[in-house]
């Protein structure tokens, strides 16, 4: 594997391999000094053309815990503001000597373009509405950690599926690992066609919640909505929000997930996000170890893993 652009690049075996590697890096992350020399001498750059808190900071933390050097690119203070193209930006950064580029862009396909121009490993940190593979990997890891496996588990993905790269990557990864996925949304927030999606769809959240092992809430992505797709946010919350009343419909072992950032009070009630069965903080914590595994898989070597020594 030279790049990580889509969950589909990994297949079931590739996902399993990353999740097994993640176990090792969870152990490293729990040490008093959570650092190993596995990627000493390598340089990882964050090339984010769109806002991020979790993905950017967790990749940077992951790279540092592996002893790689890091570079951060911020559009607002870069020469992109003077009209420099993405291709020239990538070539400029590569000329400084980098080994991996983590890229986020508002347009679908940009990480593939960069992979075509670049000799570095390219990791998709989220492209438009299209894919967010490392989010899917950390979600799979978190479900396995809480529920043991995804095989045969029932997952409801609720909300703005249409504009969600997380939903697209999660559907691929969850179903590859054997989960049954139901999309729950008003018709205006579903893709125009679900042909080829290995899912069922519903707009009756109250009927679905008692049957699922996982309810995965999506953020209402108002910045990606060019038209009025809902009468109002208040109506959305009334019909589809995970309110305290609805959370009581879940089984005792069911978990609540959200990729963040959350709109508390819109897709999820503030109190529900803090319940013991809400694993949203676990998702963020696991995101660092999963991204260590991805960076190690792309830039490291197996012999370094055998003795993950302290740095
Ligand atoms: N889940 C996620 O991608 O969050 P950020 O936009 O903060 O990176």
Image: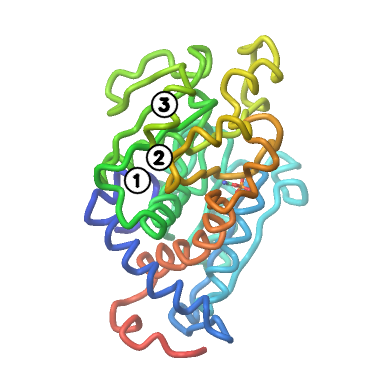
Q: Secondary structure at mark 3?
A: helix
Answer whether labels 2 and 3 touch (C-beta < 8 Å): no
Tell me how far mark 1 sits from mark 2, CA to CA: 6 Å
* Corner quadrant of residue 263: top right
In terms of depth relative to the viewer, which is nearer, 295 or 86? 295
Q: Residues within 10 Å of mark 3 (few under 14, many from 20)?
A: some
Q: Residue at x 52, y 55 (%)?
A: 283
Answer whether labels 1 and 2 touch (C-beta < 8 Å): yes
In terms of depth relative to the viewer, which is nearer, 64 or 167? 167
Height in image: 126 above or below 142? above
Q: Secondary structure at mark 2?
A: helix
Residue 177, x across and y down, in percent: 26, 47
Q: Earlier in the sequence, mark 3 or mark 1?
A: 1
Report the colour scheme: rainbow
Nearer to us of marks 3 and 1 is 3
Q: Secondary structure at mark 1?
A: helix
Residue 175, x across and y down, in percent: 28, 39
Which of the labelled discs sits on residue 7, or is there none?
A: 1
Q: Residues within 10 Å of mark 1 (few under 14, many from 20)?
A: many
Q: Which residue is mark 2?
A: 169
Height in image: 23 above or below 91? below
Q: Residue at x 28, y 63 (%)?
A: 17
Nearer to us of marks 2 and 3 is 3
Q: Is residue 64 shown left or right of residue 250?
A: right
Q: Is mark 3 within 8 Å of ligand 1?
A: no
For the image, the number of numbered tags is 3
Q: Which residue is mark 3?
A: 208
């Amino acid at each position: 594997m030279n790049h990580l652009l889509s969950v589909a690049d990994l297949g079931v075996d590739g996902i399993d391999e990353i999740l097994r590697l993640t176990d090792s890096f969870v152990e490293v992350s729990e040490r008093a000094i959570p650092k190993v020399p596995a990627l000493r001498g390598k340089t990882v750059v964050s090339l984010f053309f769109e806002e991020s808190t979790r993905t950017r900071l967790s990749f940077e933390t992951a790279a540092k815990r592996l002893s790689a050097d890091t570079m951060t690119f911020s559009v607002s203070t870069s020469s992109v503001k003077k009209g420099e193209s993405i291709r020239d930006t990538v070539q400029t950064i590569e000329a400084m000597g980098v080994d991996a580029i983590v890229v986020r862009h508002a347009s679908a396909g940009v990480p593939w373009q960069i992979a075509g121009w670049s000799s570095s490993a390219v990791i998709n940190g989220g492209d438009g509405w299209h894919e967010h593979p490392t989010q899917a990997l950390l979600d799979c890891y978190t479900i396995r950690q809480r529920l043991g496996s995804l095989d045969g588990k029932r997952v409801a993905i609720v909300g703005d599926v249409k504009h969600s790269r997380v939903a697209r990557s999660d559907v691929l990864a969850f179903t590859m690992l054997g989960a049954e996925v139901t999309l729950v949304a008003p018709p205006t927030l579903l893709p125009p066609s679900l042909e080829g999606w290995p899912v069922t769809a519903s707009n009756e959240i109250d009927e679905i919640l008692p049957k699922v092992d996982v309810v995965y809430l999506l953020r209402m992505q108002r910045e990606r909505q060019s038209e009025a797709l809902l009468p109002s946010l208040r109506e959305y919350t009334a019909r589809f929000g995970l309110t305290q009343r609805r959370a009581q419909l879940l089984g005792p072992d069911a978990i609540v997930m959200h990729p963040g950032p959350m709109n508390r009070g819109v897709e999820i009630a503030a109190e529900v996000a803090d319940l013991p069965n809400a694993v949203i903080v676990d998702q963020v914590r696991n995101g660092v170890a999963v991204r260590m595994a991805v960076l190690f898989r792309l830039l490291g070597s197996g012999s370094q893993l055998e003795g993950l020594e302290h740095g």
